[in-house]
Image (cartoon, rainbow, N blue to C red):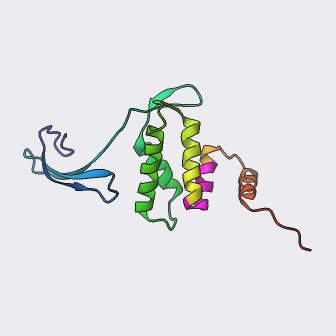
């Protein structure tokens, strides 16, 4: 592992333990060249995934990109960070276990929206506003009205 401080490629692992999510390993590392200490995380990767964009462009799946977009939608929401990490790990496991290495970006978006809808409706609407490319307030109104249960007429 390359040292983030000096670039030395010969770093040493000083301590390894399961991370809080129990899906990754947390490693404390030491660089003998500069004395720097840093932490890395190691995760199991079942297969290399490729995302096929709506334009047809192909790019490697980036867990960090997925995590950033989810965390933006969850900003200032009363959801524990551990729950968000579990959700992200679950989404990635689901994508990896689909059996395909090529995954449509639309499929990923739908899986993320499904997971967010179960955890926090505000985050779900935030994510949907970007994913579905809302252009006006009417788009929000229409989407949110679909979330509300139908009003029963009074007798």
Question: What is the span of residues highlighted in magenta in the rendered image?
Answer: 119-129
Which of 44/27 is in front? 44
Provide residue 45's location: percent of width, then percent of height: 35, 39
Q: Is residue 77 left or right of residue 46?
A: right
Residue 45 in the magenta stretch? The answer is no
Residue under the point 9% across and 51% down: 35
Provide residue 95's location: percent of width, then percent of height: 47, 40
Which of 97/133 is in front? 97
Residue 124 in the magenta stretch? The answer is yes
- Image quadrant holding the N terminus, namely top left
The picture quadrant where one finds residue 121 is bottom right
Which of 28/20 is in front? 20
The picture quadrant where one finds residue 111 is top right
Q: How many marks?
A: 0
Residue lying at the far left of the rendered structure: 32
153 above or below 89? below
Provide residue 88's location: percent of width, then percent of height: 45, 51
Tell me which secondary structure the magenta stretch mostly adopts: helix
């Amino acid at each position: 592992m390359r040292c983030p401080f000096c670039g030395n490629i010969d770093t040493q692992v000083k301590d390894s333990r399961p991370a809080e999510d129990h899906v990754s390993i947390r490693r404390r590392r030491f660089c003998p060249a500069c004395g720097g200490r840093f932490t890395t995380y190691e995760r199991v990767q079942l297969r290399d995934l490729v995302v096929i964009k709506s334009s047809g462009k192909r790019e490697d799946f980036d867990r960090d990109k997925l995590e950033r977009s989810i965390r933006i939608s969850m900003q200032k929401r009363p959801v524990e960070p551990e729950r968000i990490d579990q959700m992200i790990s679950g989404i990635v496991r689901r994508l990896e276990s689909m059996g395909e290495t090529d995954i449509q970006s639309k499929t990923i978006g739908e899986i993320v929206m499904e997971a967010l809808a179960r955890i926090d409706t505000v985050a779900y609407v935030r994510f949907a506003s970007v994913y579905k490319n809302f252009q006006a307030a009417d788009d929000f109104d229409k989407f949110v009205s679909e979330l509300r249960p139908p009003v029963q007429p009074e007798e």
